[in-house]
Amino acid sequence: MARNTLSRSLHDVGLAAWFGGTLANAVALNAAASEAGGDQATGDVANAGWDRWTPVNALAIGAHLVGSIGQLAGNKGRVANQQGVAGMSTAKTLLTAAALGVTGYSRLLGQKVSAAGAPGRAGTKPSKKTRSDAAAAQLQLDRLQWVVPALTGALVVVSSYAGEQQRPSEVLSGTRA
């Protein structure tokens, strides 16, 4: 079996950044923004933080996807012949697609909030001064900010399981004759 160090590294580092960055922003940035000293300042700080995170997140996601494709190509024989690997690969693909969809939709909502210069009580909590369209986007973001870390966290778990499937004893016992 050939080494896939580059693709594995891109996969893992990209996923780690995607998971960790979105979790940190949901846990810390959105709550900390409320200490900015007023509803408008709160919105400005939260918007600036998420806007700065977006290009880093895009690079992380891109690295993860390139690494995932490399891993799939490097393990195509195992996917075809080792029991359970195709199912795990399908699960990873579906989780990745869901995480991409929620991330993309969240970014669209975030752009709406940022463009409106929406004030807030916290990063995802509108104030009474927030326009109704921006407030609706903030409320959706309040729920979705936890979905991306949940999905990418699930990807970390499935990736750990995939690594276990590569143990020699697993490969031997799961290979079809």
Image (spheres, rainbow, N blue to C red):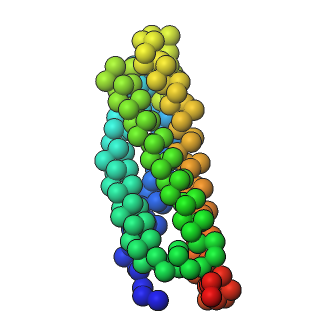
Q: Nearer the viewer, residue 20 or 170?
A: 170
Does residue 62 appear in this view? yes
Q: How many numbered circles are shown?
A: 0
In the image, residue 154 above or below residue 68: above
Seen as rendered, the residue at the extreme front is 177
Which residue is drawn at the image coordinates 57% and 75% (left, top)? 163
**Which residue is at 39% across, 20% downward?**
118
Above or below for 63 versus 3: above
For the C terminus, the image quarter is bottom right
Q: Is residue 104 left or right of residue 160?
A: left
Residue drawn 34% across and 34% down? 48
Q: Position of residue 117 (x, y in %)?
A: 34, 21
Q: Is residue 113 above or below residue 7?
A: above
Residue 142 pos. (x, y %) = 54, 30
Does 76 sit above or below residue 151?
Answer: below
What percent of the width, then of the height, locates residue 70?
38, 71
**Horizontal and vertical percent for residue 43?**
41, 25
Q: Can residue 167 be seen?
A: no
- Which residue is at the front of the view, 40 or 7? 7
Q: Nearer the viewer, residue 104 or 114?
A: 104
In the image, what residue occupies the spot 47% across and 89% down?
A: 1
Image quadrant where residue 44 sits: top left
